[in-house]
Amino acid sequence: MELLSIIVPCFNEEATVESFYARTSAVCAALPEIRVEYIFVDDGSRDQTLPLLKKLAEGDSAVRWLALSRNFGKEGAMFAGLEHARGDFVAVMDADLQDPPELLPQMLEAVRGGSFDCAAVRRVDRRGEPPIRSWFARQFYKVINKMSRTEIVDGARDFRLMTRQMVDAVLRLTEYNRFSKGIFSWVGFRTQWIETENVERSAGESKWSFFKLLVYALDGIIAFSTAPLAVASVLGLVFCVIAFFAIIFVVVRQLVWGGSAFGWPSLVCIILFLAGVQLFCVGILGQYLAKTYLEVKGRPIYLLRESGGGNTHEK
């Protein structure tokens, strides 16, 4: 029998983890000739998430749990789960039930057929989200797909089911600054997209504020595109050309008409504008340098504090 590993990153999910397990278990019980293991990754939760995971593991030997030493973020938690997954197929799901477990049979069928290496979910609407947040999300996908050669599908969620071959490929990318949507796309492999409507959290609150999403979007652009560096170079070249012709214009005007080299207010405005452009370009360079600095340190993506749980079992 083939083994399906279900990875569930958890951060302060005491209100949802039990309902997620119950609902997902009911779906997995109907999967033919499939053994299931659950890998819950506690990403430094400050509530009762970890005790609840230990309780689930005591009642079901298919449940395993990993407790990270602190909060490393969802990217680190997903990587920890992928490293510990032993399945022939591996699924990544959120504990808040925004990823409907009922899609698992369809995703598994697509992958087991041999035509696809991955079945992934994308939402076709953003009902329930603030309009401004939805607008920025759509603009992000437009911008990154124009700037990067790696296609990021609009509305793509982290909910996906992959073959062991694809998981092994993802694990080879051990970069510290991780943007999984881009990584899953960059490794290639054939992906079937399953469209679904937006589902709101079953309980609790989202851990993603607007600012965190903005930072995550910038990380994605920096991780999968060097276009901002090109923009900085082009801006520098353009303003050098403008400055060259402006100098010629001022000199000629002074020689022909005289007394025309005045106007310090406009000069101050020009200096401030150019200084802003320079700082903007330096900021772009600084972002890439900062990411490089973090990469060369060679720090681990996560640190494991403790783990437990039983082995997988046949249903």
Image (tube, rainbow, N blue to C red):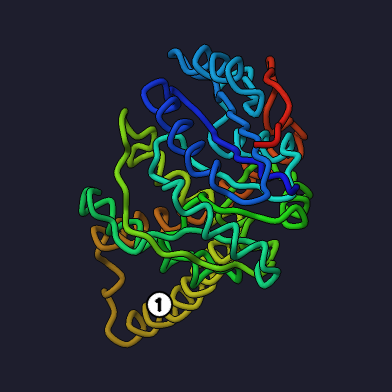
Residue 68 position within the rendered picture, expressed as x and y whole percent measured from the top left: 63, 21
- Crowd rating for badge 1 (residues with CA inside 10 Å; few <14, some 14–19, many 20+): few
Pick whichever, 180 or 108, lies toward us: 108
Pick whichever, 31 or 115, lies toward us: 31
Q: Is residue 115 left or right of residue 168?
A: left
Q: Where 17 sits versus 126, above or below?
A: above
Pick whichever, 67 or 214, lies toward us: 67
Looking at the picture, which amino acid does disc 1 mark?
Answer: Ala
Q: Which residue extends farthest bottom?
A: 256
Q: Is residue 204 left or right of residue 28?
A: left
Q: Where 77 sits versus 153, above or below?
A: above
Residue 237 sits in quarter: bottom right
Mark 1, secondary structure of its residue: helix
Q: Is residue 117 left or right of residue 29?
A: right
Q: Which residue is mark 1?
A: 246
Residue 282 position within the rendered picture, expressed as x and y whole percent measured from the top left: 53, 51
Residue under the point 39% across and 54% down: 276
Residue under the point 75% across and 47% down: 1
Residue under the point 32% across and 58% down: 197
Residue 209 position within the rendered picture, expressed as x and y whole percent measured from the top left: 34, 37
Residue under the point 56% across and 47% down: 287
Residue 79 position within the rendered picture, expressed as x and y whole percent measured from the top left: 66, 39
Pick whichever, 61 or 152, lies toward us: 61
Q: Is residue 260 left or right of residue 191?
A: left
Q: Where 239 sits versus 48, above or below?
A: below
